[in-house]
Structures are given as C-alpha cells and as structure tokens.
Amino acid sequence: MADGNRTVVYLSEQVIVLCSCALSFLGSSLIIITYIIWSDLRTTPRRLLVYLSVSDWLSAVSYAVGVWSVFHTDSLECVAQGAISTFANTSSFFWTVAIAVYLYVFIVRSSQRVADSLVLFFHLVSWGVPLAITVTAVCMKKIGYDASEVSVGWCWVRIGAPDRVLWMLLTGKIWEFLAYLTLPVLYILIKRHIHIAHAALSEYRPILANRPPSHSFSSMADMKLTLIPIIFIVLRIWSTVRFILLLAGSSARQHPVLVTLHGIGNTSQGAANCIMFVLLTQPIRTRLCAALCCCSKRHADEQHSHDAPNRLLPGQDTSTQREADSTSQVGADR
C-alpha cells in the first residue's frame, strides 16, 4: 500500500471518491438553485446554508481535481488545487459552526435582531480567516504535494515542510477539532430549550385524543437537530483518525479502507446537507416533485403535438395518408 511515506491511491478508491465528489457537487448546486428560484425560501438560516453550500461546492470540485490527477510533484496545478481545497474546506467548518451559533441565538436567546446582526461577523470570519490562512500558507510555500499522507490524492501541506504538523493544524485540523466540540454543545442546548418550551406550552393545551398535525414536522426538526452534529462528526472523523495516526507514526493511516472512508467523508458534506435540508424538507421536496412532474408533462405535450400531424384521423386508412403525403410532396416540388 505504501511506497516510503507515500500512500498509494488505487483506482477503486479514486472512482469511489470521485462519485462522492459528484454527489456533493449536485447536492450543493441543488441547495443553491432552490434558494435562487423560490424567493419565499430566502430566510436567513437558509441563506447561511447557501454560503456553506458554496464552500462545499468548491471543496467538491477541488477535491475531484486532486483525486482525478493524483499529483506527485509540487506543480503549479497542485499548489492551486491545494490552496482552493484548503480555503473551501476551512470555510466549510466556519459556516457549519456559524449556522449553529445563529440558531442558538435565534432560538435559545430568542433574539432575531442579535442573530441577524451576526451575519456580517460570520462573513468576515468564515471567508476572511480561511483566506488569510491560505494566502499565508501559499506565500510561505507550505501548500503542495503531501504524498497523500492525510489526503486522498489531492494536495495539502507539503510533505517536505519541517513544520508541516503546525500547518496541518492551522489549515484545517484545529478548526475541525473546535467544530467537534462546539456543534454538539450548541445543538444539545437548542434541543433542550425546544423540549422545555414544548413541555411548558403543553400544560395550557387541552388533552387531545389524536396527535396535533404539527407533530410530524416537529419530530423531523428534532431529528435534524440530532443528525447535524452526528453526521458532521461521522463524515470528518476518518480524516482526524488518519491525522492522529500520522502523529503516532503508524502505517495504519495508509490502510485502503481508512483512505476510502477519509475520501468519502471529506467530500460528502454537500450531499449530506442536500439530503437533510432539501430532500427531507417536505415543502421543498413537494415543490421539486411538482416541478419535475410539470417538466415531464410539458415534454409529453410537446411530443404529442410533434407526433399529431403524422397520426391518422378517424376513418382514414394508410393508403389515404400516403396519398396525402405524396400530394403534399408534389406541391412542394413545384
């Protein structure tokens, strides 16, 4: 599996990770498109999700280029791909935490004004900090060929950099660790606040034989609050495991299964967000189904109108149709 320090990326691993990149690209694009075409969905939380999707979109594209190329030198293309993926991946961490902070302030602190005022701060931090780190790393020639030690074909921190562990932390790992700690705490506090509010409100409601109509929607929202940090950790943990194994000097970081899981996890955030916030969100799912049905019906109508002139009228046989066609052909020749 390994050639010295270099982790060999097999063709099967490339195919799997490229498929993951494609799904994340499509998922991020779908989130952005639904936000653009339906103006009533343009709430602040979904706008923040769009910014996260832009980062995930960039990550998917840059990772796909790296996995497809499997760079072996510090070429200009390698540095460019490594810089874009470093910026996008770090920005994704910040926007993921920013959404959790916004929801915490909006729901737990019950202050929409304060929550909305944080959006500018989110932009400065979520775009500015990753950009500053990436530009500094490129200028100091820290980004380049990393022999897939903690990647899957793409470029990151140069393997020859003497302080590469420090730059691995600065260009991603330290923000990943902070997200592991921050996201579960914030979403647990949000869930706890919602459950307390529901319990207090239920004391003033009459006892009904049937469940309220909103039960399924609140259950889905509650499930999402549980899944968001879990999915983030499940997807990202493989990258963290390989980083820890690198620090320990273990060759287990080069195991094909671990490399594949790392590749899937790092490139699947956009697809996971699409599943949770588009496909599992009933109003958006309903609109998408209606739009698809409308497009299918329009295509069928166009096909019907295109075939109509060639169809036989009631009582008209094939010979009559052929005679009419030949007559029209003679007229055209004249």
Image (cartoon, rainbow, N blue to C red):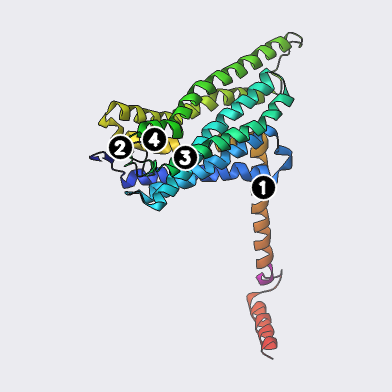
Q: Residue furthest front?
A: 140
* Pointer 4 local density, CA inside 10 Å: few below 14, some 14–19, many at least 20: many
Cβ–Cβ under 8 Å for marks 3 and 2: no
- Name the amino acid, label 2: Pro
**Whole-percent x and y of residue 178?**
49, 24
Q: Nearer the viewer, mark 1 or mark 2?
A: 2
- Name the amino acid, label 1: Ala
Please report whichever mark, 3 or 2, sits nearer to the chain's N-terminal start: 3
Please report whichever mark, 3 or 1, sits nearer to the chain's N-terminal start: 3
Report helix, strand or loop for mark 3: helix
> Residue beneath label 3, please?
136
Please report whichever mark, 4 or 3, sits nearer to the chain's N-terminal start: 3
Measure the alpha-carbon separation of dots 3 and 1: 46 Å
Cβ–Cβ under 8 Å for marks 3 and 1: no
Which labelled disc corresponds to residue 127? none
**Whole-percent x and y of residue 6?**
27, 41
Measure the alpha-carbon separation of dots 4 and 3: 26 Å
> Residue beneath label 2, please?
256
Measure the alpha-carbon separation of dots 2 and 4: 10 Å
Quarter location, residue 168: top left
